[in-house]
Each structure stands twice: as C-alpha cells, then as structure tokens.
Image: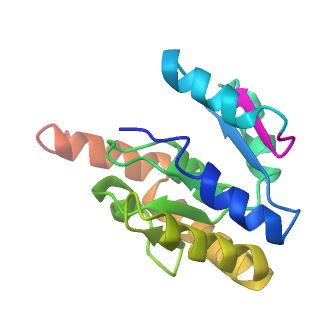
Amino acid sequence: MKDPLFALEPLARLRRRDPRVAFVHCGDALDGDLAEEFRRRAAGEPWIRSLRALPFRRMASAYAGASVVLNTSRSEGYANVLPEAMLAGRPILAAAVPSNAEAIRDGRTGLLYAPGDGEAFLRAAARLLRDGALRRRLGAAARREARGRFSPAAEARAVAEAYGGVPG
C-alpha cells in the first residue's frame, strides 16, 4: 500500500530545524480521502507540493532537482521510481518492504527504515540532510549499480527468466 502522507509529519519536524526541507509528491493523482488529507496538510505549507504524474520526458529533470527520492510504501510490488532514481544518481530513502530492500543496498545505494517507523525515517532523513558527502556517495553508488542491474539488457533477461527462461 502506497503511503505518500507518511513522510509529512517527520519532515515537518525536520523542517523546523532546517528550512531547506521540502516535500514534492510526484506521481499519480491522489484519490478521494487521501487527496483531501494531502490538501489539508499542505494548506499554508509552501514546502509541500504535488506535481502529480509527469510525462516521461520530464522525469530526468525532476530527479535532477531532487536531493533524495522517497519511497514510503508499506507494501508494494516493484516500483519504477527505484531504478529511475538510481540511474539519475539520487540516493533513496525507503521503507524496508521486500521490493525496496531487493533494489536498495542499505547504506550503500540508499537508506532503508522499518515501515511505519517515523522516528527511524526522521533519523535517516536528518542524516541525509546534514551529510552532503553521504548523499553524493550513495547517489554515485546507486548509479553504478543501476547501470548493471537495471540496464535494458538486464531487465529483458530478468523478465525472460521469470517467464520460463531466456529464448534461445
């Protein structure tokens, strides 16, 4: 289950200490009660924005503008945001659900926290905020790893193997 609002409270606490903190939700439009709750929490908070879904051609510039990419899902299948952010050289802060933990090497290509643990999320976010060298190191390692693990050829092999082997 996606949980885009999870980060707002810990990030608000962090923003009180450092005004550089901003949250930009980028993705499918939020529905119903979730959209209303997002609007309520974002009201009067210029550091919270929603860009909705962006066309593919604009994603590279969106990643370039991000210091850290978040994935706060409490359960989700494989999310395209992970290899995209990694290929863009951005560190990821994500819930340690199986699909995220499979893609992200904790402490090497990003940071993982226990799903729903706001304090662990806050500690990791604060660490990334104050340590630019860590962000650069994680982002560079993520890009190197993604070029091998998530290249078109590697993705095609993985899909072929999942459906019964590589055609010969």
- Residue 68 seen in render: no
Q: Height in image: 73 above or below 44? A: below
Toward the viewer: 114 or 44? 44
Asked if residue 98 lies left or right of residue 104, the reply is left
Image location (x, y in percent) of residue 86: 59, 59
- The magenta span reads 45-52
Asked if residue 46 lies left or right of residue 111, the reply is right
Which residue appears at 77% of the width and 36% of the height?
49
Which color scheme is applied?
rainbow
Image location (x, y in percent) of residue 88: 69, 55
Image location (x, y in percent) of residue 137: 68, 81
Q: Quadrant of the N terminus?
A: top left
Q: Quadrant of the C terminus?
A: top left
**Count of marks, rendered view:** 0
Asked if residue 156 lies left or right of residue 134, the reply is left
Dominant secondary structure, magenta: strand
Q: Height in image: 68 above or below 52? A: below
Task: Give the quadrant of residue 46.
Answer: top right
Q: Height in image: 72 above or below 34? A: below
Toward the viewer: 87 or 168? 87
Toward the viewer: 57 or 48? 48
Q: Height in image: 11 above or below 152? A: below
- Residue 49 seen in render: yes
Which residue appears at 37% of the width and 59% of the height?
115
Which residue appears at 47% of the width and 54% of the height?
150
Residue 24 is inside the magenta segment: no
In the displayed orientation, state which residue is furthest to the top.
Answer: 32
Task: Give the quadrant of residue 136.
Answer: bottom right
Image location (x, y in percent) of residue 72: 48, 51
Toward the viewer: 55 or 77? 77
Residue 50 is inside the magenta segment: yes
Which residue appears at 42% of the width and 47% of the height?
73
